[in-house]
Amino acid sequence: MREYQNWINGQPVAPTTENYIERISPADGTILAKFPRSGYEDVNNAVAVAQKLHVSGQWSNLAASERAKVLNKFAELIEVNSEMLAKIEAEEVGKPIIYARGEILWAAELVKFAASLAWQIPGEAHTHLGENKFGLVTREARGVVGLIVPWNFPLVCLFQKLPYALAAGCPVVIKPSEFTSGTALEVVKLAKEAGLPDGLINIVCGKGSVIGDALTRHPDVKMISFTGSTGVGKTITRVAADDMTRVALELGGKAANIVFADADFDAALDGVLFGVMLNQGEECVAGTRLIIEESIADTFVEQLIDRAKKVVIGHPLDENTQIGPLIHEQHFTKVLEYIEIGKSEGAKLVLDGSKPEGNNLGDGFYVGPTIFTDVKETDRIFQEEIFGPVLTVTTFTTEAQAVALANNVEYGLGNGLWTKDVDKALNVSKKLQSGTVYVNTYLEGAAQLPFGGYKQSGYGRENGVDALLEYMEVKSTFIKLGARTPVLPNTI
Ligand code: NAD
């Protein structure tokens, strides 16, 4: 069992509450780790340290090239330690180790990209404002930022925020999920080793309703960057409004994968299956709604079922596993309830993953790929985020119908589409109301491409240049040179 403390001012610090949360393995019930169940005082201590560093300018006044150098070293250390981090991520989340490895390396890549952005923080000079008049547009680190992250991609969700905040010059206080705090608490040691100053990255573990709330209310926290459910995102926004604390929100999703009859059939089969089963479907951008052209629907679904039956369900540390257990019992029960809801709504359960077969599944919280056909757009399983490997199938006959079906949900994080017709691909992707559209692929990412939501999936962007700018205030400086003359005659 791994025993952790909070991380404040470059060292482990026991919580003032002297209380801890046990993380139980979702695969086999063993105790994996103990994380602090911290209190308000711990948040105050962490914010005070971060604020002191901000005021000192020790990090934000460092040449951006120097910040980049340390960040690159940090990325290297993450790569060197990737196997250790992947194992912890796999155990705590329940995600297959083969995917956990990719997640860690992706986090390292985001650090390198953010480091490259530090070199080119944009500013402007305006020299045509009138005689002897100049204008400067400059960007400054916002100040202390609270980063609140969920359990499904603990390190990637964190690293779509952390390196950009650091590149911008902001100290942070992190609130990891109470289920999966391990990798954040390991990686921060690497940050210290890389040369990031003490007090720049602080971590306070515990319950969201206590620690997340306290961070959001703290007057010295100038921004909260949150990834999690839409409900909690709204709560945070309301609390933050009292102090006009800036909020960036990465929230829930209900992505559609639209398959046209002219798609590469084989590639679409793989993409649709991967889109719904990656991370056991515990994925904000999971392609959980297959919207398929009627003429190919029966054959496609038949072959999809065949492939889905071959997906290997098992212990997250087993190299062959493609689907691990869901995060915890409560969530497991919720996903099973949705399977019952689907049946009661009249959808046809053509693949039932509620009692999966696999090696040594024991009492783990396993759910295998599950497919419903004949799903109506008013059905709850079509509209609500299930966060498990449950796919709904709905058919269309016209392009307009496909777009309307895809857009007819409250979320707008991602969507996918499959066609060989470039005109159709561009036309449809333009009409889809989501921050990301995948064309003839699914769940690929590139650090240069911003990630974020439309509608109830939130606002603000992670990755791309936009991510860096989220953490910076913009200042306009108007300069008048030469003899001082009144701005308005007779007023000064
Ligand atoms: P959650 O909203 O329950 O919790 C997210 C984080 O917020 C956790 O650290 C939690 O402790 C904290 N929290 C809870 N209550 C809080 C409060 N009142 N104030 C401040 N913080 C609080 O989400 P979850 O169950 O951990 O994760 C699953 C959700 O996250 C899904 O809805 C999923 O779609 C979403 N998600 C979105 C993205 C994205 O990029 N858009 C990525 C991953 C997950």
Image (spheres, grey):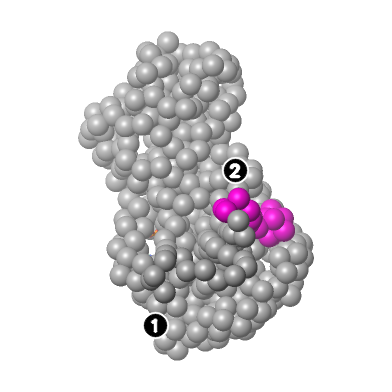
Few, some or many residues within 10 Å of mark 2 (<14, 14–19, 20+): some
Disc number at residue 40? 1
In this rendering, would 281 be left or right of 233? right
In this rendering, would 56 be left or right of 67? left
Residue 173 vs residue 240, the one in the foreground: 240
Q: Residue at x 57, y 53 (%)?
A: 129
Asked if residue 443 shows in the view, the reply is yes
Residue 75 x %, y % = 72, 61
Q: Amino acid at mark 1?
A: Tyr
Contact between labelled residues 2 and 1, with CB atoms less than 8 Å apart: no
Q: Quick check: 434 above or below 265?
A: below
Q: Secondary structure at mark 2?
A: loop
Q: Amino acid at mark 2?
A: Leu
Q: Residue at x 36, y 31 (%)?
A: 407
Q: Residue at x 42, y 50 (%)?
A: 459
Residue 377 vs residue 67, the one in the foreground: 67
Residue 91 x %, y % = 56, 60
Residue 488 vs residue 284, the one in the foreground: 488
Magenta stretch in the rendered image: 111-130
Residue 467 x %, y % = 56, 54
Q: Secondary structure at mark 1?
A: helix
In this rendering, would 341 be left or right of 4? left
For label 2, the residue is 449
Q: Nearer the viewer, mark 1 or mark 2?
A: 2
Residue 287 x %, y % = 46, 36
Screen quadrant of the N terminus = bottom right
Screen quadrant of the C terminus = bottom left
Q: Is residue 118 magenta?
A: yes
Which of the four quarters of the rendered structure image does ligand 1 lie in?
Answer: bottom left
Tell me the distance, in whole angstroms, between the alpha carbons under discs 1 and 2. 37 Å
Q: Quick check: 276 above or below 114?
A: above
**Displayed quadrant of residue 9:** bottom right
